[in-house]
Image: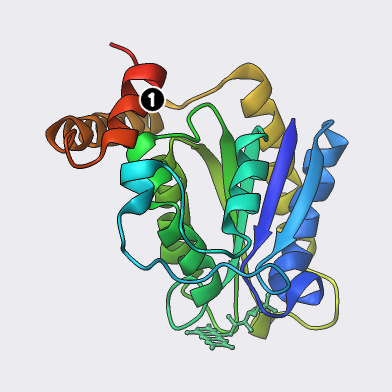
C-alpha cells in the first residue's frame, strides 16, 4: 500500500501532529505500507480562488504545490491527514488543501483509496475535528478507517502515553488491512453512497457549465 501523509502544521515534522502521525506510520509500515510525508509548510497550498476553472477544465490555475501533491495522492492507495486543533477546527493550511480539492469531491476522484485522520490539541475538542476530517475523506471517495488524537497539555515528556501509542499503531495496521481486504463498514458505505449520488446529481444538473466534470463522470463512473 502506497500512502501519502499530509501534515497541516507549521511545526512540520517536529510538531506534535507529525509525531503522533509517526506512531500511525509505524503501524502502517509494519504491515507493509510505504509512505511519503508532505508538510504544508515547505510545500505551499494557497486558498481556493473560487474561479470554477477546475470544474470547467479540470486544472487549477494557481501555480503552487497543489497540483504536484494531487498527482502524488492520485498515484497512491491511501491518505493520512494530520492537523493541529486551530480554534476548534483544522489548521488554515489543511483547510486550504481541502478547499482546493473541490473538484476532487465533484469527481469523486479518490474513490478506491483508504485513509485515516490524526489530530493534536493543546487542551481538547479533537473528536469533532477528526470527525470532520473523516467526513472530508468520505466526500472525496476515500474510505475512512478511523482516527487518533492526543491532548498535548495532558502529556508530560516527549513520549505519547502507551495507550495513545497503541491506538495509533493499531490504526496504521488497520488502515493497511482494510485496504488489502477492501473492507467498508456498512454505515460508512451508506454515507459514501449517499455523497456519491449527491455529486452525481450535481454534475448531471450542471453538465453544460462544468464540461470537464461531466465528461469525467461519464468516463469514470458509468452507470
Ligand atoms: C493558532 C493556534 C490555535 C490553536 N487553537 C487551539 C484550540 O482552539 N484548542 C486547543 O486545544 N489547542 C489549540 N491550539 C494548540 C495546538 O492545537 C496544539 O499545540 C497542537 O498540538 C500543535 O500541533 P503541532 O505541533 O503539530 O502544530 C492552537 C494553537 C495555535 C498556534
Question: Please, which residue is most extreme toward the left here?
Answer: 205
Task: Establish if 62 lies above or below 143.
Answer: below
Residue 148 appears in view:
no
From the top left corner, tell me how far across and down residue 14 is, in percent.
Answer: 81, 75
Crowdedness near tag 1: few (<14), some (14–19) or many (≥20) residues, C-alpha within 10 Å:
few
Q: Going by the image, does 223 lie left or right of 24?
A: left
Task: Establish if 119 lies above or below 201.
Answer: below
Q: Ligand 1 quadrant? A: bottom right
Image quadrant for the N terminus? top right
What residue appears at the point 40 percent right and 66 percent down from the top-left corner? 48
Q: Going by the image, does 206 lie left or right of 211?
A: left
Residue 87 appears in view:
yes
What residue appears at the point 76 percent right and 55 percent down from the top-left corner? 37
Task: Establish if 27 lies above or below 191.
Answer: below
Total count of labels: 1
Q: Going by the image, does 58 lie left or right of 81?
A: left
What residue appears at the point 46 percent right and 34 percent down from the top-left corner? 109
Q: In terms of depth relative to the viewer, which is nearer, 168 or 111? A: 111
Image quadrant for the C terminus? top left
Q: Which residue is mark 1?
A: 186
**SS of the residue at dot 1?**
helix
From the top left corner, tell me how far across and down residue 209 is, in percent.
Answer: 19, 42
Question: Please, which residue is most extreme toward the top here?
Answer: 223
What residue appears at the point 64 percent right and 38 percent down from the top-left corner? 78
Amino acid at each position: 500500500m502506497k500512502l501519502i501523509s499530509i501534515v497541516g502544521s507549521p511545526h512540520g515534522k517536529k510538531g506534535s501532529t507529525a509525531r503522533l502521525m509517526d506512531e500511525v506510520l509505524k503501524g502502517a509500515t509494519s504491515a507493509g505500507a510505504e509512505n511519503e510525508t508532505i508538510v504544508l509548510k515547505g510545500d505551499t497550498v494557497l486558498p481556493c480562488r473560487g474561479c470554477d476553472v477546475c470544474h470547467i477544465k479540470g486544472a487549477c490555475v494557481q501555480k503552487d504545490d497543489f497540483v504536484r501533491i494531487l498527482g502524488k495522492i492520485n498515484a497512491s492507495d491511501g491518505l493520512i491527514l494530520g492537523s493541529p486543533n486551530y480554534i476548534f477546527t483544522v489548521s488554515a493550511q489543511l483547510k486550504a488543501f481541502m478547499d482546493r480539492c473541490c473538484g476532487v469531491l465533484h469527481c469523486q476522484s479518490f474513490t478506491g483509496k483508504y485513509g485515516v485522520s490524526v489530530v493534536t490539541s493543546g487542551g481538547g475538542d479533537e473528536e469533532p475535528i477528526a470527525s470532520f476530517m473523516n467526513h472530508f475523506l468520505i466526500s472525496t471517495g476515500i474510505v475512512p478507517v478511523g482516527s487518533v488524537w492526543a491532548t498535548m497539555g495532558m502529556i508530560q515528556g516527549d513520549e505519547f502515553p502507551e495507550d495513545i501509542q497503541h491506538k495509533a499503531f493499531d490504526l496504521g495496521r488497520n488502515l493497511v488491512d482494510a485496504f488489502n481486504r477492501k473492507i467498508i463498514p456498512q454505515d460508512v458505505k451508506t454515507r459514501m453512497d449517499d455523497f456519491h449520488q449527491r455529486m452525481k446529481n450535481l454534475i448531471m444538473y450542471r453538465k453544460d457549465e462544468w464540461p470537464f466534470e461531466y465528461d469525467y463522470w461519464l468516463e469514470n463512473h458509468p452507470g
